[in-house]
Image (cartoon, rainbow, N blue to C red):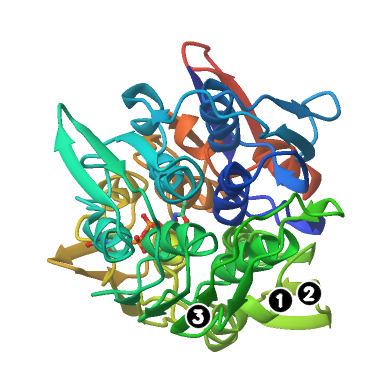
Amino acid sequence: MHKIVVKGGSRLEGTVHISGAKNAALPILIATLLTDGVHRIVNVPNLADISSTLSLLGRMGCPSLISGDGQEAVQEITIDATNIAFCEAPYDLVRKMRASVLVLGPLLARKGYAKVSLPGGCAIGNRPVDQHLKGLEAMGCTFEIKGGYIEGTVSHLKGAEIHLDMPTVGGTENIMMAAVLADGITTIHNAAREPEIVDLANFLRSMGARIQGEGTSTLVIDGVPALRPSRQPYSVMGDRIEAATYMLAAMMTRGSITLTGVPVADISFLCNIVKEAGGQIQMHNASSLTVSHSGPITPVSVVTAPHPGFATDMQAQWMTVMSIADGSSTVTEKIFENRFMHVPELARLGANIQTDGRVAHIQGVSTLHGATVMATDLRASASLILAGLVAEGQTEVLRVYHLDRGYANLVEKMKGLGATIGRFASSETVTL
Ligand code: UD1
């Protein structure tokens, strides 16, 4: 087990390249199951969740090859999806990564059968998959839940009108992946509008799928009899959450960071909030911007919402910025019912935060103090690193395997910007 140790006080400055988006790469890699042949995907982030996905595909009989020496933040991946020998996502892999449930749609579409371990609860809430199943059932699939597994079968996938109860990202992706091979037209109403859905639609289209309306709440998919691998290597979009995290690092350290590889158009909501809080943003082009901050941070309250609203995946990091703002603010979490586990950890660093149900009340403090803290989930761990960048003294963040799921080469990238930071064995005694 590893820990990350940060010594606070360095002003971050320089340029950082943002990796491909985890939440786009996962469904795209899984979508290769839809057709036989060899697929090439580039700009895939080097993350634990990507390794888990490749293990899952490998166990199904689809081997993959990763270019390079495994050290780069992004990589090129070749997947041979010619044969699917085993239509199952076992418990040991789904437990590590809930997104494994996305194999349901592609396996049912290509093989007519899928067996996937029930994702169960996770640290940030219950996260059921009822909407995924409801959509697939409308298309003719039948499901049986037994022994902790969802077992689905279908003899003839047919297009359907599907109304989602909430704009679920994974649910929209699962249904969309099944619908591309269904007989007839599928319309998904109240679909998720996240940019990663648009990236998946673009990838599916590069394989011959017919999709309209991605990025809006009505997706129309006209099923085709077969797909084929994309002719050109497909490049995954940049990671808007990683980008946002570095933008907030610039604000907190009163630094100036230029980001490249950013899907600038997809982070306009956050850019407005950063400006409201006193940050300066200079747009360079569609994939690059500079964020800088000097002087006090103005408190800005946020409420999480589906895209294009304030992303729940940025909530913990924003709360950290607000914990050193010049006054009080609130963060309201509307997507997940239990996503404040970072609050007691931030409190260990001196933050003044009280929670009341889904609302966190934050009173900004002038200084945070280094301490040993525990990462509880992926984005919570990023919030603790941000806090460590400005805390007096040294902060040790334990259980960084959460961070490894979503931030490619974080330590190297932060060092490149001037942070005093390192990764060590948990048992090591470290003084930076
Ligand atoms: C995805 C993202 C995750 C992000 C989340 C919300 C990936 C791999 N992960 O997760 O980083 O935080 O979107 O933006 O892309 N729900 C149901 N029934 C369902 C499905 C969802 O009740 O069948 C509820 C969930 O419990 C949750 C809400 O809907 O409260 C949103 O979940 P969803 O959009 O599905 O998130 P994920 O796809 O799991």
Question: On the image, numbered disc 1 is attached to which residue?
Answer: 264
Q: Are marks 3 and 2 in contact (CB under 8 Å)?
A: no
Task: Categorize mark 3 by other alpha carbons within 10 Å: few (<14), some (14-19), many (20+).
Answer: many
Instruction: Name the residue type under label 2.
Output: Leu
Question: Where on the picture, by quarter, is residue 112?
Answer: top left
Spatial separation of the CA atoms under disc 1 and disc 3: 26 Å
Quarter of the figure that contains the C terminus: top right
Q: Secondary structure at mark 3?
A: strand
Task: Categorize mark 1 by other alpha carbons within 10 Å: few (<14), some (14-19), many (20+).
Answer: many
Would you place residue 372 above or below residue 104 in this image? above
For marks 1 and 3, the one nearer the N-term is: 3
Would you place residue 44 above or below residue 130 in this image? above
Q: Which mark is residue 220?
A: 3
Q: Nearer the viewer, residue 98 or 331?
A: 98
Q: Nearer the viewer, mark 3 or mark 2?
A: 3
Picture residue at 46% right of the left edge, 57% below the top:
178
Specify the quarter for ligand 1.
bottom left
Q: x, y percentage for residue 401? A: 48, 29
Question: Where on the picture, by quarter, is residue 122?
Answer: top left
Instruction: Name the residue type under label 3.
Output: Val
Q: x, y percentage for residue 192? A: 43, 74
Task: Categorize mark 2 by other alpha carbons within 10 Å: few (<14), some (14-19), many (20+).
Answer: many
Question: Where on the picture, by quarter, is residue 62?
Answer: top right
Q: Secondary structure at mark 2?
A: strand
Question: On the image, numbered disc 2 is attached to which residue?
Answer: 289
